[in-house]
Image (spheres, helix red, strand yellow):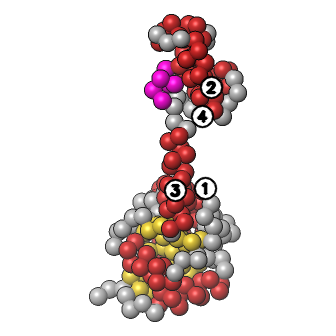
Amino acid sequence: MAKIQVVLVDDHPLAREGLRNLLNKAIDIEVIGEADDGVEALHLVETLKPDVLVLDMEMPGLSGVEVAQQLKSINAPVRVLALSAHNDKGYIMGLLANGAAGYLVKEEMLQTIVEAVRGVARGEQGWLSRQVSAQISTWTQEAQSNTLTPREMEVLALVVEGKTNQEIGLALGISEKTVEKHLVNIFAKLAVSSRVEAAVYAVREGLV
């Protein structure tokens, strides 16, 4: 049976050595290349054509997110598994948005890393550390709580048109007091403090 071929990318030699020793102990996994920066990582993916790229986030040259972006842009068949000391939102969402199959933190149990490499090689998605999974859930809930309701969207559209509270109330068949309540919610969700800021935000973000 052919072994899963892996390229390791980490700018810390001791970290790479530990990972290499861990993965090479598995009878079905072989580390065929190592890189200490993003540019070299792309070169090794192109020349060695590994099954899995185990990718750190913070490196000289290109970051892990930038490496994933470039691989996605050329439709590289390699599967990306992020293994990082950081659980930063930008890193996590950037990697997953660019096709990474998983994101583990380096404190993960060693056997979990081995199983993740196997799973990713099989085409599985969603290999996430427990803490990363919990954070994504929290971020999703926050995003949902910041989403405008259909009625708030209607009010915002009329604000963009320059309508007064009275005119908005007449247009929507609601009282001015209700319009004011909707505006308070809109301002809070958009993190703005005035009708003008809300209108500018709505136009800039394509909400209306």
Give the Cα distance between marks 1 and 4: 21 Å
Q: Position of residue 108 (x, y in %)?
A: 54, 77
Badge 3 or badge 1: first in the primary sequence: 1
Mark 3 crowdedness (10 Å alpha carbons): few <14, some 14-19, many ≥20: some
Q: Place residue 49 in its image quadrant.
A: bottom left
Question: At label 3, which amino acid type do we have?
Answer: Ile
Question: At label 1, which amino acid type do we have?
Answer: Gly
User: In the image, is residue 142 above or below residue 161?
Assistant: below
Question: At label 4, which amino acid type do we have?
Answer: Lys
- Mark 1 and mark 3 in contact (Cβ < 8 Å)? no
Does 174 lie within the magenta span? no
Seen at 59% across and 28% down, the residue is 186
Give the Cα distance between marks 4 and 2: 9 Å
Seen at 47% across and 90% down, the residue is 24
Residue marked by disc 4: 189
Seen at 66% across and 69% down, the residue is 59
- Tell me if 122 is positioned left or right of 156 in this view: left
Badge 3 or badge 2: first in the primary sequence: 3
Residue marked by disc 3: 136
The magenta segment is: 149-154
Give the Cα distance between marks 3 and 1: 11 Å
User: In the image, is residue 192 above or below residue 43?
Assistant: above
